[in-house]
Amino acid sequence: TMDAYGNITTTSAITANTSGLAVNLYSDYDANASGSINIGAGVTSNGGIITILGGGGTINTTTAFHNLTLSTASNTITLGAALTVTNGLTLTSGKLDAGSNYAINVGGNWTNNSGAAAFTAQNGTVTLNGTTQTVGGTYATSFYNLTIDKTNTPTITFASLTFPIANTFTATGDASHQINFNGGHLSKSSGIQSVSYSTLTNATANGGATWQSFTANGNVDGTGNSGWIFAF
């Protein structure tokens, strides 16, 4: 076990792939590696920020990060396992690739300041499972599957950008867990997308798909919505 306090910067590649290794990072952690980065099992951020800079590589750990920032210039970080970030995931530069369709679970903000092609979703699912979250940044992110978890009765705010959805958008609440999502522009080329027990405000949806938010299914039509169908 390594407990690290303060700012830590390494100048060579990082490999932490021993399953029994626990790296507890209580402050900012900069992996300023000139080579590839392989973060393996057992890495824990414990409330700090892990920032990966420099070369591309693979994230193999199934242990949750608290905050994770990728700033890898033109290089790509590829997932070798499902990724869980309990707070914020920030793409500053470089690319994040979901690898073999690995799931990504984010409990805080999803921020894309890298570019429109900064995230390669493959056929994977991004799940927003926090309480109050923002999906945005300078650039919109394209998702394959985007799911809003109802557990924390969340409020999700989308930036004023167009977010392409290749496959499914899922927002399925229930009588005890109303989902709130605000703003943004969801776009899908075809098919039917339905939500339930969701309150929509200033939400736009189009792109050729049919977007159903029937009030009979517990949905609430707030103000400023466009493209959503609230009545049969």
Image (cartoon, rainbow, N blue to C red):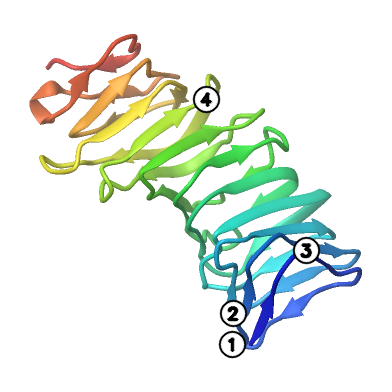
52 vs 9, nearest the viewer:
9
Left or right placement of residue 232 versus residue 112 in this view? left
Could you say which is closer to the camera, residue 73 or residue 46?
A: 46
Q: Element under label 1?
A: loop
State the residue in front, 125 or 156. 156
Separation of residues labelled 3 and 2 (CA atoms)? 22 Å
Contact? badges 4 and 2 (CB < 8 Å): no
Element carrying mark 3: loop
In the image, residue 96 lies at what x, y percent? 67, 51
SS state under label 4:
loop
Q: Which is in the foreground here, disc 4 or disc 3?
A: 3
Q: Which amino acid type is marked by label 4?
A: Ala
> Which residue bears the numbered disc 4?
159
Answer with mark 4 or mark 2, whichever residue precedes in sequence.
Answer: 2
Identify the residue under disc 3: 7
- Going from the N terminus, do you reach mark 1 or mark 4 first? 1
x and y percentages locating residue 151 in the rendered image: 26, 51
Q: Which residue is mark 2?
A: 41
- Quadrant occupied by the N terminus: bottom right
**Marks 1,2: beta carbons within 8 A:** yes
Inspect the image, locate mark 3, and give the three-letter code of the amino acid beneath it.
Asn
Comes first in the chain, label 1 or label 2: 1
Q: CA distance from mark 4 to mark 2?
A: 33 Å
What count of labels does the image hold? 4
